[in-house]
Image (spheres, rainbow, N blue to C red):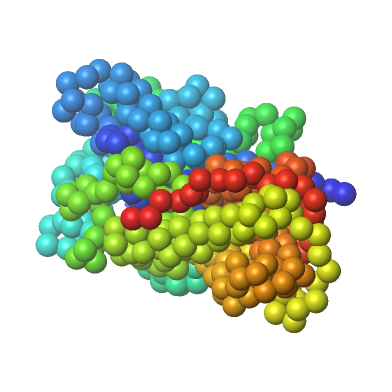
């Protein structure tokens, strides 16, 4: 059987200050999608990292009074520690200061320069340091960027990439490849943007003004524009220069860039045209998700002064609860209001009640009435048969939704399945059965419930990494039976094995 590949990336983040909820969102979702794809049997690669050059970083370092590289190293460590705390496990953490990355940036610059796709000219324009983007006079709204950020006027000679040359080809590509930019509303947004003529992209900064960057291989007085440098990470981190001898091509064909909607143009337009010019196929997909919004329905951001620190949420609720809320918070692709109250509600209803309580209640009865041994049964009741049908449909549904990045729908369905199991359990009242002499009914109800918990726990394992393991260990499910295939059929739980009692697996808030 030929191997199936999957490659997922997050944007690489600016280490100008500590990670916030927006960074954590993309990163946790990418980690979860990657773990699911791996669970479905694919060979996967997940990369995140940091975007370390440019004026924004330079200014932040200056402000801190530290030497630039030392400042960056310190914040990068905070990113890495945060991801560890959130149980995020990338295959690679790329830094744009990595020598391998720098080599690929210089390769790309040389290639485009030699092809005549890079030229030098004098230029004046408005520059936004916070976004690291140039604007023309007509782009500005009340003297600021469309999102309200400050700009400075800059006049200088720079190098330009002939982005405009690729405009028609890009429009054609986006029209012919409907899943290239997702969701559909974002695809339309990019097509709308491309209705106006594209200008060429300024890809350099004079070293005299911005010394913090990768030197242009053909002019040592300049460094590379930070977005040109950063976007290259998606190929440099995969081992682009050694692509004849590694899995680069296999992974690249199955590449997905997960980004926030505010950085759509840089990916859909800059990156796509850069790849066209470099004669590298475009990634398989660019998926732009929405924002977490504050109580005033604005993007949560540092400038709004209301950023939630993922580590503080994590300290209060635990990494798994945070991961669960990130995935289940709202329709993936749309904006979502961030609310601690909604988060508590979800955790209480879906994790503590639907999942945790069911584990406690069913385990306790097995211990009391069956000496802790999983009963062996024949399925007789209609209600059991109906639930089993639901169980056997669940994993396929989860797979289809994960593969189309409907992560919230997939998670909702697992939780909803557990709700149905709770109803089944409540209706059959197994705690009354022994007294009433209904041993078959009691055993059947418990076996069906425990097997449902087995499947739900396996399916939750990419999100609730430790807890699902705890439940599966308690149920004595061997590690090699925790695969996708083992979730497709009912009854894989071994009757006759002893289960281990657990203290409550989730707290209530
Ligand atoms: N360095 C660039 C990306 C280069 S990728 C080649 C960058 N970095 S960033 O540190 O500003 O991080 C941006 C990411 O965080 C974006 O995907 C952005 O959408 C996300 N978020 C920032 N605030 C957000 C929310 N409030 N909600 C969700 N995500 C948001 O841009």
Quadrant where the C terminus sits is bottom left
Q: Residue furthest right?
A: 1
Q: Is residue 439 visible?
A: yes
Spot occupied by residue 134 in the image (x, y as percentages of width and height) = 28, 49
Q: Residue at x 71, y 55 (%)?
A: 370
User: 343 or 204, which lies in front?
Assistant: 343
**458 relative position to 321: left or right:** right
The residue shown at (74%, 68%) is 439
Q: Residue furthest left?
A: 142
Please state the horizontal and vertical placement of residue 132, each as a whole percent of the image: 29, 44
Q: Is residue 349 left or right of residue 54?
A: right
Which of 111 and 308 lies nearest the eye of the viewer? Answer: 308
Q: To which quarter of the image does residue 452 belong?
A: bottom right
Up-down relation of residue 332 to residue 220 (above or below): below
* Depicted 76 relative to depicted 433: above or below: above
Q: Residue at x 67, y 67 (%)?
A: 434
Looking at the picture, tell me which residue is in the foreground, 132 or 184.
184
In which quadrant of the rendered view does residue 288 lie?
Answer: bottom left
Asked whether the viewer can see residue 236, the reply is: no
The answer to whether residue 166 is left or right of residue 212 is right
Give x and y (percent) for residue 163: 45, 52
Closer to the camera in the image, 89 or 348? 348
Residue at image position (21%, 56%) is 145
How many badges with numbers are in the image?
Answer: 0
Q: Where does residue 447 sit, x and y in percent of width and height?
A: 72, 62
Q: 123 above or below 341?
A: above
**Which quarter of the picture shows residue 419?**
bottom right
Residue furthest bottom in the image: 382
**Image: 131 above or below 350:** above
């Amino acid at each position: 059987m030929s191997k199936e590949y999957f490659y997922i990336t997050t944007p690489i983040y600016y280490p100008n200050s500590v990670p916030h909820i927006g960074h954590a969102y993309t990163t946790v979702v990418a980690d979860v999608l990657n773990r699911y794809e791996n669970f479905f049997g694919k060979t996967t690669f997940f990369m995140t990292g940091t975007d370390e050059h440019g004026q924004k970083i330079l200014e932040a370092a200056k402000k801190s009074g530290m030497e630039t590289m030392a400042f960056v190293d310190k914040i990068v460590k905070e990113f890495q520690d945060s991801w560890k705390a959130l149980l995020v496990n990338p295959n690679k953490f790329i830094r744009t200061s990595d020598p391998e990355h720098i080599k690929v940036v210089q390769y790309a610059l040389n290639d485009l320069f030699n092809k005549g796709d890079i030229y030098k000219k004098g230029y004046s324009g408005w520059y936004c340091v916070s976004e690291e983007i140039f604007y023309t006079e007509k782009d500005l709204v009340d003297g600021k960027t469309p999102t309200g950020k400050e700009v400075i006027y800059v006049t200088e000679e720079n190098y330009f990439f002939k982005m405009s040359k690729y405009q028609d080809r890009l429009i054609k590509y986006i029209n012919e490849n409907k899943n290239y930019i997702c969701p559909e509303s974002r695809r339309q947004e990019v097509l709308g943007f491309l209705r106006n003529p594209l200008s060429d992209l300024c890809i350099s900064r004079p070293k005299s003004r911005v010394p913090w960057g990768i030197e242009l291989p053909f002019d040592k007085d300049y460094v590379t524009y930070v977005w040109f440098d950063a976007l290259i990470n998606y190929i440099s981190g995969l081992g682009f220069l050694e692509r004849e001898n590694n899995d680069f091509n296999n992974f690249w064909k199955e590449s997905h860039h997960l980004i926030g909607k505010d950085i759509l143009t840089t990916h859909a337009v800059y990156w796509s045209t850069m790849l066209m010019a470099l004669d590298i196929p475009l990634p398989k997909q660019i998926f732009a998700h929405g924002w977490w919004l504050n109580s005033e329905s604005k993007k949560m951001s540092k400038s709004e002064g209301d950023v939630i620190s993922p580590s503080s949420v994590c300290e209060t609720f635990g990494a798994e609860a945070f991961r669960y809320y990130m995935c289940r918070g709202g329709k993936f692709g749309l904006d979502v209001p961030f609310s601690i109250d909604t988060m508590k509600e979800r955790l209480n209803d879906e994790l503590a009640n639907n999942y945790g309580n069911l584990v406690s209640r069913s385990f306790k009865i097995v211990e009391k009435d069956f000496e802790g041994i999983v009963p062996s049964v024949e399925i007789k009741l209609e209600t059991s048969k109906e639930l089993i049908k639901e169980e056997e449909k669940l994993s396929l549904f989860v797979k289809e939704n994960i593969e189309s990045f409907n992560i919230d729908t997939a998670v909702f369905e697992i939780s909803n399945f557990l709700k149905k199991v709770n109803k089944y359990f409540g209706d059959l009242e197994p705690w009354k059965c022994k007294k009433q002499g209904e041993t078959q009914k009691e055993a059947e109800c418990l076996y069906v419930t425990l097997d449902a918990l087995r499947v739900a726990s396996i399916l939750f394992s990419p999100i609730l990494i430790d807890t699902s393991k705890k439940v599966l260990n308690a149920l004595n499910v061997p590690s090699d039976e925790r695969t996708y295939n083992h979730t497709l059929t009912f009854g894989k739980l071994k009757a006759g094995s002893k289960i281990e009692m657990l203290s409550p697996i989730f707290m209530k808030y």
